[in-house]
Image: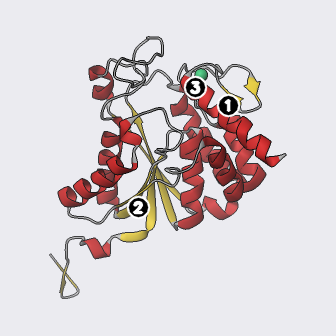
Amino acid sequence: MLWRGKRLQAITPDMIESRSALVLFSGGQDSTTCLAWALDRFELVETIAFDYRQRHRIELDQRLVVREEVRRRFPEWAGRLGEDHFVDIGALGQISETSLTRETAFRMEQDGLPNSFVPGRNLLFFTFAAAVAWRRGIRHLVGGMCETDFSGYPDCRDNTIKSLQVALNLGMDRSFALQTPLMWLDKAATWALAQHLGGEPLLEVLLEHTHTCYRNERGPRHDWGYGCGECPACALRKRGFEQWRETRS
Ligand code: ZN
C-alpha cells in the first residue's frame, strides 16, 4: 500500500503508543483504584470488562456508573478516559464449577484454594485485553491483581503475571507492559493509594458506587460501602477499610 510515496508499515513494537493504557475494569474497589492510577499517568486510558456469567453481575452495571462518576468529578481525567470494551466470555462460566459462577456456598477446598477461584480467569482476561490492545496500539495493560492481601488465587501472583507478560509479548510480537499497581499493597494501603490519587471525591466514588460483593448484594450502606458484609470479598474489603481508618485517626 502506498501513501505519499511511502510504503505503509505494519505496526512495529517501537511504534506502540506507550502513553496509553487499557485497564481491566470490573467496577470494584481494586480496579477503580487502578483506573485512577492509570488516569494519573497516561494520556489515554481505555477500559475493558468481561461477562463470564459471574454471579455478582451488578458489577457490570456499576462499572458504567463508576466511569461516569469519575468523568463527572475529575475534569482533568475526563479527557483522558477513552473507550470502554465489553467482551462476552460466557464459555468460561460454562466450564467453571465455582462459587463465583454457580449457586454454591463459599468454602475452602482440600487443596487450600477457595472455591471462588475460577481457573484461568486472570490469564484469559489479560490475553483478551492484549488482543484488544494489539488492535488499538496500546502498550500498558493494567490489572488489580494483588499478592499481598489476596484470596489465595494463584493467578494473582506476581510471577504468574510476569510469566504471562513474556508469553503475550512472544505470542503477539509486541512489548506490552502488564502493570499491577496493587501487587504489593494490602487492602488498607489500597484505600490510602486511592486517597492519594483522588482525595475525598475518589473515596466517595469508591464507597458509593463500586461493587465488590460476590453475592451480588448491594443492601444497606456500610462504612466501607455496599455488600452482604459476610462473603470473602466483603470481609476483605471491610477489614481493609477498618485498618486504613485506624491509621488515619
Ligand atoms: Zn458480600
Asked whether 10 or 126 is in front, the reply is: 126
The residue singled out by tag 3 in the image is 213
Residue drawn at 33 percent across, 24 percent down: 93
Crowding near the residue tagged with mark 3, few <14, some 14–19, many ≥20 C-alpha atoms within 10 Å: many
Q: Is residue 139 above or below residue 186?
A: below
Q: CA distance from mark 2 to mark 3?
A: 28 Å
Cβ of mark 3 under 8 Å from ligand 1: the answer is: yes
Q: Amino acid at mark 2?
A: His
Q: CA distance from mark 1 to mark 3?
A: 11 Å
Q: Is residue 203 above or below residue 117?
A: below
Q: Amino acid at mark 1?
A: Lys
The residue singled out by tag 1 in the image is 238
- Relative to 35, 9 lies left or right: left
Marks 1,3: beta carbons within 8 A: no
- The percent coordinates of residue 126 (x first, y second) are 34, 47
State the mark number for residue 140: 2
Label 1 vs 3, first from the N-terminus: 3
